[in-house]
Image: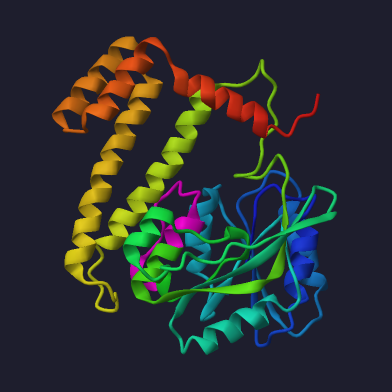
Amino acid sequence: MIIAYNGERYVGEAVEGAFSQTYSPLEILLSDDCSTDGTFDIMQRMTADYRGVHQVRLNRNERNLGLGGHISHAMESARGELIVVAAGDDVSLPERTEQVWQAYAESDGKAMSIYSSFVMMDEQGRRQETVSKPPHETAYDIEAYIKAGGVHGCSHAWHRRVFDVFGPLYPGTVYEDKAIPLRSVLLGEIRFIDEPLVLYRRHSQSITGPQCHTSAEIDVVADVVKRQKRRLLTLKNYERDLLCRHESIRIDAAIRNRLAASIHKRIRQFELEIAFNEGAFQDRIRVIRQGISAHLGLPRLAKWCIQLVYPYHLIRARRKLLAESACKG
């Protein structure tokens, strides 16, 4: 599955990577999220010109759904047992699908998420370092996953059951590489392939890549809130999926209920954090009062009180944005 949005500069390479896969039988779904550039035209032309052994299907969303919504919508069309996903600006190496299937077979069907190492490349396609992050040693422990889990999103593949059982992701979800693997832990296992199977392109227009900022144009509050809202949606996915009552979930319901209750409290904290950062002075006073009623604890309330007069978190965020910036000079 190639999921793309406004990626006319790179999508041809991504499609060629899909066409080059050595595994067969393979369905290739080229899906465009209502791009405003020539992305879909390129997909359409390459589909028409394709003469290989794979089955190629084409989709264009009627409106832009965002990353999580796009994946959820595409899953309604995908017919394969394993879903091997690539962004429209990345490139899958030819053996990727074959190795994913082999890892799944070696797990005796228990692997619900499979991911690999990847090679970084720049906007011009020049290869850089290899990135490898094996799963935490307790990757199959649901509590450990919630604390420190996640996979390489650019090399992530999953079994279709993670959507058949739990349904679509929350609209607006960006960190699908955290939300989907939790489902995999609930149903089975996460497997890691210690070999680079994807070329991951890092550039300033990607959703989670480094953004181009100058000191004058940074809206620190908007950036902080954007990141908080993304994390909030991840937690909402966690809470809903933990409370799912499907019979195939392998984790005891009592454990899941306890974790869901803890996550619900964190959700409330994030909602108040967002309201605090977006609000004026009186709004922030109101948030602190709500925090007292919600029993959020003295450390968090004290932090908000300090931030009323000295917004150190925004100063720190501004420095971080400038440090991460793709701009030079």
Q: Position of residue 40 (x, y in %)?
A: 71, 56
Q: Residue furthest left?
A: 293
Is 119 placed left or right of 79 in the picture?
right
Residue range corresponding to the magenta coloring: 164-180
Rendered residue at 75%/71% (across/down) = 93
Locate residue 144: give its quadrant: bottom left
Q: Nearer the viewer, residue 275 or 317?
A: 317
Please state, as top left, top right, bottom left or bottom right, where the C terminus lies in the image: top right
Q: Is residue 179 magenta?
A: yes
> Is residue 282 left or right of 140 when viewed as pictured?
left
Measuring 24% from the left and 43% from the top, which residue is drawn there? 265
Q: Is residue 139 left or right of residue 114?
A: left
Q: Say above or below: 168 vs 26.
A: above
Image quarter of the N terminus = bottom right
Magenta span has 127?
A: no
Judge whether 299 appears above or below 135 on screen: above
Residue shown at 61%/21% (left/top)? 218
Residue 151 to residue 263: above or below:
below
Visible in this render: residue 159? Answer: no
Snapshot quadrant of residue 215: top right
Q: Is residue 96 visible?
A: yes
Locate residue 235, reporting x and y percent: 35, 49
